[in-house]
Every structure is written in structure tokens, then in C-alpha cells.
Amino acid sequence: MALSASIRTRDGWAVPHAVITVTDMTGTQILRAEADTEGAVRDGTPLTPGPYTAIVTAVGYSPVASTALVTAGGVVRLGRITLNRQADTELPPPGPWTVDPVHSSVEAVAQHLGLSSVRGRFGAFWAHIDIAQDPGKSRVEAVIRAASIDTGNALRDDHLRSPDFLDAARHPDITFTSTGLTPAGGDRWTVHGDLALAGVVRPVDLDLAYLGTGPDPWGGVRVAFRATTELRRDDFAMNYNQVVRAGIAAVGATLKVELDVQAVQGEKLP
């Protein structure tokens, strides 16, 4: 294929029927191709080697433009192109929002043996979001049940609940209370807050992406966010480890936390 690309949202979903328009340096349109249902663009139209401009558009998304260099073989591979959803406001409408745990997830990822990752998911949590007229004064409060950790292995899960890690018997709740919100450009925000984990409270920043607001099939209004952060285990007194070979630890020193959140407008879920 002369032209190939993959069009995705920030959270990794395909953008079907996105359109790539290729123009030369004079602004003349040379090629126009549409993505399929998987967000893939493949077009066999031969292109003369040289620089071009590729503009990607899709209904409901902000356009993206980039320079495309066609090789001597007449091929241009644009790779993955990320589109951001358009929003009428930089945050959802002000007021209370209640997180829907059925359509949300809280996951932690740890490195294992320095080779691969082990992913854990918390099955019990709840949270409330209050969007203020002044976005910087918005607040988030969340509670996660430590004992609800699930990595797909009962022995490992029991160990994670023990005092070596989460110490769920003595500290059943993991809590996050926001202390501030800072814009990071476009639909990105940094949520500052205090995380209480295994009996230790530390300041933690969440990198937040606002994914959009829209109606749901039950007559409500929903908002979606994706947030990530990275924690050091020893910051929360989780110092357990086992060196298995040549200084390689069984469990990595850091945890990646990934939150995919849907919230419903209002004080409670319908």
C-alpha cells in the first residue's frame, strides 16, 4: 500500500470512517482516503517521492495535520494517529457526578521478574466528582476496597492482601481526596490529591484526560475520563521483595495505576 495509517482515540479505540487528505506543498489535494471500521487506512494510489501534508479529520474530533514524507518507493506509513474528541467545554458541566463502577475500572500494573507485567483489578470502589464553576476548585473523592484486588491467581491475591503489601485487614480502604486541579493543555488536566494506601498518606498527581460528555440510554448524562499515575511501593511502606537471580527482584519497585472512569450526572446513580 502506498498510504497506510491507524486512526485511534486517546484511549486506544478505532475511529471508523476518519478521512486522511494528502496535499502537496502548494496545498493541492493529491489523495483522499477513508478509514475502515477498524480505523485503518490503506490506499494504493502511487505518490511521487517528497514531502506532503496529511490532514486527518473525523466528525466529533479535532483535526490533526502532520508532514508526510513519501519514500523513493512511493510509500508513506503514517503509523498511529491519535485524535482528540471535541468538547464544548474544557470540563463537563458544573455540578455533582457519581462514578458508575459497572462501567469503570481501577487497575494496577507491576513488573514481574524484570520481564513482563502482572495486572491487578480492584472490583469494589466508589467515587464522587464535583465540578466547580471555577474548574480549579473541582473536587474528587474516591474509596477502593483493598481486599477486592484480583490478579487472576488466588494465592497471589491473598499475598497482596497481607501486611507485605496492601495490609487489607488493618487498612481496608484505599482513599484518594483531591486537593487541586491544574490545566495541562486542551483536554488534559493534572489532579493533585492525597492517597491513603496501606496506612500511609502521600501526595499523588493523576494525569487526567477528559474524553467527552454525552447522553446514555437511560435518560442520563455521562462523562468519561482516563487517568494514570505511577507509584513507588516503598513510599507506602510496601517493601517486601524477593531477589530471584542476579539482583532481579520478583516484583518491580513501581506500580502503574490506570483508571477508566464513567460518571453519571447527579448525586447518585439511577
Image: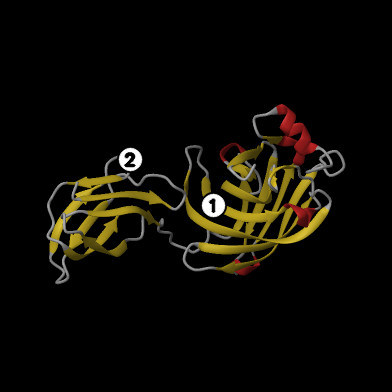
Which residue corresponds to the image point at 13% horizontal and 59% vertical from the top-left? 30
Residue at 27% x, 41% y is: 36
Q: Nearer the viewer, residue 136 or 22?
A: 22
In-front residue for pair 193/151: 151
Neighbours of disc 1 within 10 Å: few (<14), some (14-19), many (20+): some
Identify which residue is drawn at 17% across, 70% down: 25
Tell me which label, 2 or 1, sits earlier in the chain: 2
In the image, is 59 to the left or to the right of 259? left
Residue 50 marker: none
Label 2 to label 1, Cα distance in Å?
22 Å
- Visible residue check, residue 91: yes
Quadrant in the picture for residue 42: top left
Label 1: state its secondary structure: strand
> Mark 2, mark 1: which one is toward the viewer?
2
Determine which residue is flagged by label 1. Answer: 225
Residue furthest to the front in view is: 246
Residue to which mark 2 is pinned: 38
Q: Position of residue 53 (x, y in %)?
A: 23, 65
